[in-house]
């Protein structure tokens, strides 16, 4: 087991820490227990919707309508031949969706019909003149009722139900998912609430192509997420979250509007990333309309939880708006003597001085005084035969030497200014710090020769990460003849300072613990041996990128390239030596989508990625970055006028320059390793009827080490199942006796995976059941308007299973049955 190290606490306090500490001191625990959630009205009339200011230049009818749909945040479907040869004078000034469409379509012989889900379908209207010409003012669009979500859906805003239609994760622009030639899944806020998820990994349970809960019993603090066989990075509002050693920046899921999974290489826009993809977390943002929501929750292991989400305008003109979200909980766990505690607060303030400019500032704080279970159990007695069975509640450490604390804080902003009808400038910046303190007994030594006890070592880990990240973009929207372009050029930078010390006992181990008859409170010597992994590291990344999204008739093309310069330096605390290295890499991506008018969109793409490889070979040569290359083909389907989305993707992904043992120099590495991943991913999100929503997914992953100088050649990396599947259905009852009741249920399957690098044993697969019951209490009495109650259970049948193993000594129990009940009030 590799042991990251611990940090020196900087002598100079960060300004952000002071500001956050002051904010937290004013937010008392009593306030938190009195809070709970809110919801916006679901439907409004377009006539009552606030106007937006448009500066859409004259051009072809197709390009003008597409531009209007993008800026208005609506889905507008039409066949290209319907607008062939038609031109528009564009749109200048303030319009609602209704009046904007009336103006654009007046005299064209076309009208936009709103569909049940709030999207629009363009149709021709019958001629009203004697000669059959479709002209004249009588052709203007009649009044339209608009679904509020359709108007409001943007890449960062709420989505209707379980189906999102737009995202910025793959392109850094507000783009249609149909026009993006790469596989993306969006977990909406409504899905997270319906399934009552308690961590970001839990939000991905019904998403294909991802193994999100390898850490089983603790996904709140230990977010090890794998896509297409590779551990992936997490991004928060477009900027990378640090994940250095034990210092994992894990976030509370209540703070997010969306959780989006982009599969495959993404270095062309984000720099050094995993070839498997990235996870994008999108914050709740200030709202134009008031919202108020509070929640009180309890459940298994004595859970006590309270949350609040409030927001809205701060002035009559709507120039200032805010959002304040908070969550706090205290709970036991399925592991004896281990608790989880958290307080998280997110504040956001938006300033809109005019329709072309907005600035949103974010302030976040999260503290986990007790961050849950960290340790492992052996394979023998869990997934393999053993002299004694390891109980699911077994605590391998000691209550008197068990402390796992985390704290993180950040401050940042997003700025956007539309310079003119063509150019828009954006800047995104964040300063973040997290700290970690561990005092535990390391049980990764596994079973002793007697097969009845586990060897342990007392260790201490103190680590801190300080990061600065910034992304600058200049976007241009323009036309070259019949071709429409959305192009961006960008410059981003990040600096990560990771300071950590790892102290253990060396050869003088702590007393072993019996599995069948554990004795706690044994004398344990204070560790005083500093491991060589204790370092003070600084890394910097500077990247320049460019991308063009091209739309021509029914084709959508994507082309982008990026150049990165990465430098790092490291001070080893044990030797006092400093080392440094520099890397550079060029990555690119291209893809194409064909958009049929029936909603079917086949696509193909090619993308590359890179990740720095730290260290040198036996000759002192700096390692090259690992490289990822992926071919992907797929099909996306969103039937016009329906609230459904179906995607299918096949991929072939290879990572090269992987470190493997040098056969000629003992203790050194060379870069001849290669990992190959290929597979199939299917996902459907749909409203099967007016009352029934559904999610279905399937994943097949063929993963293998195709080049290696060690005994893992042609072996499958540990912890990655070959097959996974899930189905979730949600039904709203409308019959008089059951009106107000919402019933949700799901089945998720994870196939068997290998338990070590040489595939000497397997971890069995598991099928789990989840259920959720929600009732709108207003159906009991009008006095309960805004109140709702929810009862949910995950792993309903209480399966006892191991989530994953990485060796015969390091296995992790999956989560046992968890029952939660909450009461919400929205007004």
Image (cartoon, rainbow, N blue to C red):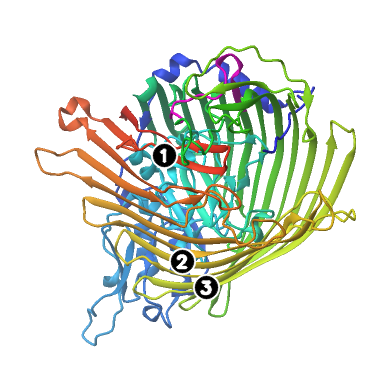
In reply to whether residue 285 is colored magenta, the answer given is: no
As drawn, is 214 to the left or to the right of 629?
A: left
**SS at circle 2:** strand
Secondary element at tag 3 = strand
Q: Nearer the viewer, mark 3 or mark 1?
A: 1
Above/below status of 311 relative to 30:
below
Q: Position of residue 517 (x, y in %)?
A: 48, 19
Residue 738, located in which quarter of the rendered image? top left
Observer-side mark, 1 or 2, equals 1
Image position, residue 488 (x, y; %): 64, 62
Q: Are there few (<14), some (14-19), or many (20+) residues within 10 Å of tag 2?
A: many
For residue 560, say whether it is visible.
no
Q: Which mark is residue 604?
A: 3
Which residue has dot 2 on it? Answer: 649
Comes first in the chain, label 2 or label 3:
3
In terms of sequence position, does the residue under pointer 1 or pointer 2 come before the other? 2
Q: Quadrant of the C terminus?
A: top left
Q: Between marks 1 and 2, how big is the CA–CA gap?
A: 30 Å
Bin the neighbour count of mark 1 within 10 Å (Cα to Cα): few under 14, some 14-19, many 20 and up: many
Q: Toward the viewer: 154 or 757?
A: 757
Quarter of the picture containing the N terminus is top right
- The image shows a total of numbered marks equal to 3
Report the residue marked by disc 1: 801
Residue 403 painted magenta: yes
Q: Work out whether 792 lies above or below 125.
A: above
Bounds of the magenta segment: 390-407
Percent x, y of residue 549: 57, 68
Q: Nearer the viewer, residue 99 or 559?
A: 559
| Gap between marks 3 and 1 measured at Cα | 39 Å
350 to the left or right of 242:
left
Closest to the camera, between mark 2 and mark 3, is: 2
């Amino acid at each position: 087991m590799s042991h990251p190290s611990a940090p020196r606490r900087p002598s100079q306090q960060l300004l952000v820490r002071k500001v956050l500490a002051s904010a937290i001191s004013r937010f008392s625990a009593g306030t938190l227990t009195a809070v709970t959630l809110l919801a916006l009205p679901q439907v409004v009339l377009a006539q009552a919707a606030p106007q937006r200011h448009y500066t859409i230049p004259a051009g072809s009818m197709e390009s003008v309508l597409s531009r209007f749909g993008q800026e208005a945040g609506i889905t507008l479907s039409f066949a290209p031949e319907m607008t062939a040869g038609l031109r528009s004078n564009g749109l200048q000034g303030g319009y609602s969706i209704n009046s904007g469409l009336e103006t654009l379509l007046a005299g064209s012989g076309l009208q936009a019909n709103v569909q049940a889900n709030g999207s629009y379908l363009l149709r021709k209207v019958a001629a009203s003149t004697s000669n059959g010409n479709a002209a004249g003012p009588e052709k203007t669009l009649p009044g339209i009722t608009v679904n509020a979500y359709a108007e409001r859906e943007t890449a960062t805003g709420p989505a209707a139900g379980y189906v999102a239609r737009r995202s910025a994760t793959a392109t850094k622009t507000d783009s249609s998912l149909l026009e993006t030639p790469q596989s993306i899944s969006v977990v909406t806020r409504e899905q997270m609430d319906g399934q009552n998820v308690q961590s970001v990994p839990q939000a991905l349970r019904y998403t294909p192509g991802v193994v999100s809960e390898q850490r089983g019993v603790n996904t709140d603090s230990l977010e090890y997420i794998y896509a297409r066989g590779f551990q992936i990075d997490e991004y928060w509002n477009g900027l990378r979250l640090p994940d250095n050693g034990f210092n994992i920046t894990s976030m509370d899921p209540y703070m997010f509007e969306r959780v989006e999974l982009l599969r495959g290489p993404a270095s062309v826009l984000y720099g050094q990333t995993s070839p498997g993809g990235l996870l994008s977390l999108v914050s709740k943002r200030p709202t134009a309309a008031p919202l108020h929501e509070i929640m009180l929750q309890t459940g298994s292991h004595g859970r006590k939880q309270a949350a609040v989400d409030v927001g809205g305008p701060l002035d009559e003109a709507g120039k200032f708006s805010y959002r304040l979200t908070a969550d706090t909980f205290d709970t036991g766990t399925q592991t004896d003597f281990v608790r989880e505690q958290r307080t998280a607060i997110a504040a956001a303030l938006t300033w809109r001085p005019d329709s072309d400019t907005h600035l949103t500032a974010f302030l976040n704080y999260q503290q986990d005084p007790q961050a849950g279970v960290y340790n492992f159990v052996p394979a023998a007695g869990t997934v393999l035969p053993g002299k004694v069975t390891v109980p699911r509640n077994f605590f391998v450490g000691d209550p008197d030497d068990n402390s796992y604390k985390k704290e993180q804080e950040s401050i940042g902003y997003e700025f956007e200014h539309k310079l003119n009808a063509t150019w828009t400038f954006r800047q995104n910046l964040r300063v973040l710090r997290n700290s970690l303190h561990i005092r535990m007994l390391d049980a990764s030594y596994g079973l002793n020769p007697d097969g009845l006890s586990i060897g342990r070592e007392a260790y201490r880990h103190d680590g801190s990460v300080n990061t600065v990240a910034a992304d600058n973009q200049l976007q241009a929207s323009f036309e070259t003849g019949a071709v429409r372009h959305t192009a961006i050029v960008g410059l981003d930078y990040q600096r990560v300072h990771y300071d950590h010390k790892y102290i253990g006992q060396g050869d003088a181990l702590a007393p072993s613990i019996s599995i069948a008859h554990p004795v706690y409170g044994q004398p344990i010597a204070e560790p005083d041996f500093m491991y060589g992994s204790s370092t003070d590291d600084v890394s910097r990344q500077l990247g320049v990128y460019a991308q063009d999204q091209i739309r021509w008739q029914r084709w959508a093309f994507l082309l982008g390239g990026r150049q990165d310069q990465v430098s790092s330096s490291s001070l080893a605390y044990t030797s006092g030596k400093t080392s440094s290295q520099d890397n550079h890499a060029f990555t690119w991506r291209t893809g194409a989508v064909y958009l049929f008018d029936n909603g079917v969109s086949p696509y193909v793409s090619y993308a590359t990625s890179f990740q720095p490889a730290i260290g040198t070979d036996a000759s002192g040569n700096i390692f090259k970055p690992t490289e990822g290359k992926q071919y992907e083909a797929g099909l996306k389907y969103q039937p016009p006028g329906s609230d459904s989305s179906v995607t299918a993707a096949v991929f072939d992904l290879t990572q090269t320059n992987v470190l493997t043992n040098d056969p000629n120099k003992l203790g050194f590495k060379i870069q001849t390793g290669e990992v190959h991943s290929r597979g199939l991913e299917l996902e459907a999100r749909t409203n099967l009827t007016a009352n029934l929503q559904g999610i279905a997914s399937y994943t097949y992953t063929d993963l293998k080490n195709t080049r290696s100088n060690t005994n893992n050649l042609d072996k499958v990396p540990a912890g990655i199942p070959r097959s996974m599947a899930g189905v979730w259905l949600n039904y709203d009852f409308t019959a008089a006796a059951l009106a107000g009741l919402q019933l949700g249920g799901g089945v998720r399957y994870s196939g068997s995976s290998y338990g070590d690098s040489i595939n000497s044993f397997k971890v069995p697969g598991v099928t789990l059941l989840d259920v959720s019951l929600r009732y709108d209490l207003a159906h009991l009495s009008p006095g309960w308007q805004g109140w709702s109650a929810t009862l949910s259970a995950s792993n309903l049948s209480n399966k006892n299973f191991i989530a994953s193993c990485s060796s015969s000594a390091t296995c992790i129990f999956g989560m046992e049955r968890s029952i939660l009940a909450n009461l919400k009030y929205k007004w």
